Image: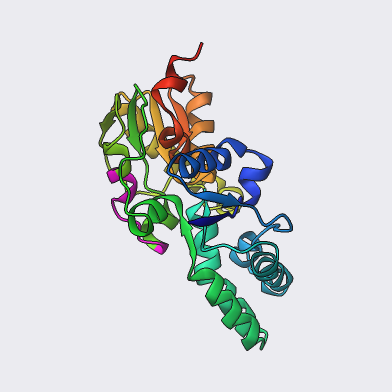
Amino acid sequence: MRIALFVTCLADALFPESATAIVKILERLGHEIVFPESQTCCGQMHVNTGYLAEALPLVRHHVEAFEKDVSWDVAVAPSASCVGSVRNQHAMVARRYGDESLALRAEEIASRTYELSELLVDVLGVTDVGAFYPHRVTYHPTCHSLRMLRVADKPLQLLRAVRGMTLIELPVAESCCGFGGTFALKNSETSTAMLADKMSNVLSTGAEVCTAGDSSCLMQIGGGLSRLQSGVRTVHLAEILAATEQIAATP
């Protein structure tokens, strides 16, 4: 299958390891990865903060980039929130400003755009990707993956198949970590309180690693854990699934 990488701003600027890990996983499974080089921001942060007019050119550009740059069967991103934006916001923004043609094109792109665990489990029919990760791990289901995309236990199905890993259930897992983009800035005290609860639950597991499918949430949780000098790391789901016994044995 020919799979387009929707890299997202956060992966491009701060967490490229999550995107390169997706490439490693899918190439290991025998798929061809292509990259629409003109892609930029999908406009999620503009929509989420009420700047719909400013989001419209970004929606149009995203659709054009994925229509024209390369041919592909499905697209994948290391971010449930960005996939959620493509699926649930792009056509809405286009229709808000009377562009039905763009809305229909956006819906076509959205219908073939997936978060990693959805792509692996639902589209490719794979739960064991050949990963090896000898650590104690707990999983945080991010709000957009849980409530917008409804990925359910797909990430857990993938994690349970990872050899050498001990998967530990996270208490009150479905509670928000408090990030929410600009929510963490505009409501910092509430965000900090939510983060404190999430960190307490992560630490109670005794896990070495907290994983999730969104780098934004891992940035929030990881920042808090590092300030506590807890020793617990945050690692994107894709990076765990990309790990192999050969990688683990490399000095």
Q: Does the magenta stretch include residue 81?
A: no
Q: Quadrant of residue 42?
A: bottom right
Q: Where 188 sits versus 226, above or below? A: below
Q: Position of residue 12 (x, y in %)?
A: 66, 44
Q: Quadrant of residue 144?
A: bottom left
Q: Position of residue 97 (x, y in %)?
A: 67, 84
Q: Is residue 156 magenta?
A: yes
- Residue lying furthest top: 251
Q: Which residue is drawn at 40% across and 33% down?
A: 210
Q: Where is residue 48 in the image (x, y as percent from the top left)?
A: 59, 64
Q: Position of residue 18 (x, y in %)?
A: 54, 39
Q: Nearer the viewer, residue 42 or 246?
A: 246
Point out the stretch of residues depicted in magenta.
Answer: 148-157
According to the image, what is the colour scheme of the structure? rainbow
Q: Which residue is drawn at 38% across and 39% down?
A: 198
Q: Where 50 sits versus 182, above or below? A: below
The answer to whether any part of residue 23 appears in the image is yes
Q: Which of 233 and 114 is in front in this view?
A: 114
Q: Where 55 sits versus 38, above or below? A: below
Q: Residue at x 51, y 11 (%)?
A: 251
The answer to whether any part of residue 170 appears in the image is no
Q: Which residue is drawn at 34% across and 46% down?
A: 155
Q: Where 251 sits versus 100, above or below? A: above
Callout count: 0
221 relative to 131 in the view: left or right: right
